[in-house]
Amino acid sequence: MKQIYIILLACLLVSSIGKVSAAGKNKKVKEKDCVAYLMSYFSPEEKLYYAWSTDARNWNMLNNGKPVFDSKVRLRDPYVHRVNGKFHLVHTKGWDHPTIFHWESDDLINWEGGPIDVVPAEMKRAWAPEFFYSKKEKLFYVFWASIKDGHNVMCYLKTKDWKNITTDQYGVYYDIGTSSIDLTIVEHKGLYYGFHKPAMTEDKEGNRMYVSPTLDPNEEGFTFGQKDHGKEVLPNQSRPTEGPEIIKLIGEDRWYIYGDPFGSALEAWETTDFKSFKKIEVKTPAKSKHCSFVPITAEELKRLKEKYPNK
């Protein structure tokens, strides 16, 4: 009887340790806990790639520059962000599909998820999906570009859990009357700054910036897309440029905005107030396209280096 009791106790202890370990993976990480940055990107081989940096300017490839995740489709425009202790990845499926892919992970290594049809087939595509998590509303604003009236418009939907999404839930986030793609959003001092690529490729536009006091296009004061193409604030952009992405530096009121020029390496600019911007030198992986960034802890960086070493 005593032996059975000991065995049962041991099983309970193992079960408890497993639960603690699993919970530990999904714990909320604060900015002060992070020591480095992870870049996610794609390349001519349309899969997910990683690079890491301690200064968000000089990037080191992981996995010898080979893919770290194959979604079994043409993976373009990956966007990885941490929300409430869990990593979320969204990306474009190939070229013209009314579908985005959404994946979740506790460790940036193992991903679970799949495709979501977000617009009717006649809208052709769902390019460069991203999301912004509203802590106030406790939900995700998900946005992407689809075809409407002959050009790309920014579409969106709201979701709490990424479940039961159907093609009748989308709305037009904004329509500037010409193409708009690659929207990314950051919040600073109660304002939302949205960077996007307006117009068509042949117009040789650079990335531009909008400012709005609200994320919700149904609220008074929403100004994304309401004032022509937005402000051109990034000096000396190569043209055309697309794929703007933003990283806030750990422990600082300083941000880097990256851009993805056609036919040349990624470029970046620095700002502390979203009013003045200075171009800076960066060193990024060869052929890296449409990157995104997330701060990571020392433990997470160690795990990624062990899983995806450079030999």
Image: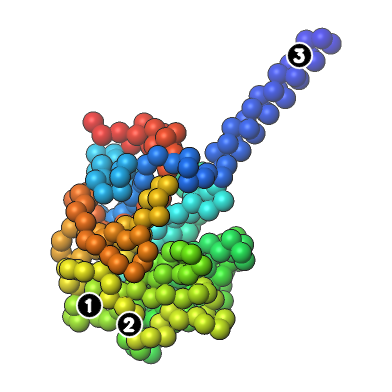
Mark 3 = which residue? 6
Which x, y percent locates residue 139?
A: 59, 64
Q: Which mark is residue 170?
A: none
Q: Specify the quadrant that holds the C terminus.
A: top left
Q: Are marks 1 and 2 in contact (CB under 8 Å)?
A: yes
Task: Tell me: 58 left or right of 229.
Answer: left
Where the N terminus falls, by quadrant? top right
Amino acid found under the numbered disc labelled 2: His
Q: For the residue carrying disc 2, how many other residues have a C-alpha within 10 Å: few (<14), some (14-19), or many (20+)?
A: many
Q: Would residue 264 appear left or right of 80 to someone viewing this image?
A: left
Foreground of the two, 303 or 47? 303
Residue labelled with disc 1 = 205
Mark 1–mark 3 CB contact (< 8 Å) = no
Q: Which residue matches tag 2?
A: 229
Q: How crowded is mark 3: few (under 14 residues within 10 Å), some or many (20 or more)?
A: few
Mark 3 element type = helix
Q: Earlier in the sequence, mark 1 or mark 2?
A: 1
Q: How far apart are marks 3 and 2 (CA)?
A: 70 Å
Q: What residue type is labelled 3?
A: Ile
Horizontal and vertical percent position of residue 216? 54, 76
Query: Which one is earlier in the sequence, the residue at label 3 or at label 2?
Result: 3
Quick check: 78 above or below 184? above
Q: Which of the two discs, 1 and 3, sits closer to the camera?
A: 1
Find the distance from the CA under tag 1 to the CA under tag 3.
71 Å
Name the spot of residue 255 as percent of width and height, x first: 35, 57
Q: Residue reaching furthest right?
A: 1
The disc, 1 or 3, on the residue closer to the chain's N-terminal end is 3
Residue appearing at x 32%, y 82% in the figure: 229
What's the residue at 36%, 46% (across, down)?
Answer: 38
Residue type of the residue flagged with mark 1:
Glu
Secondary element at image label 1: loop
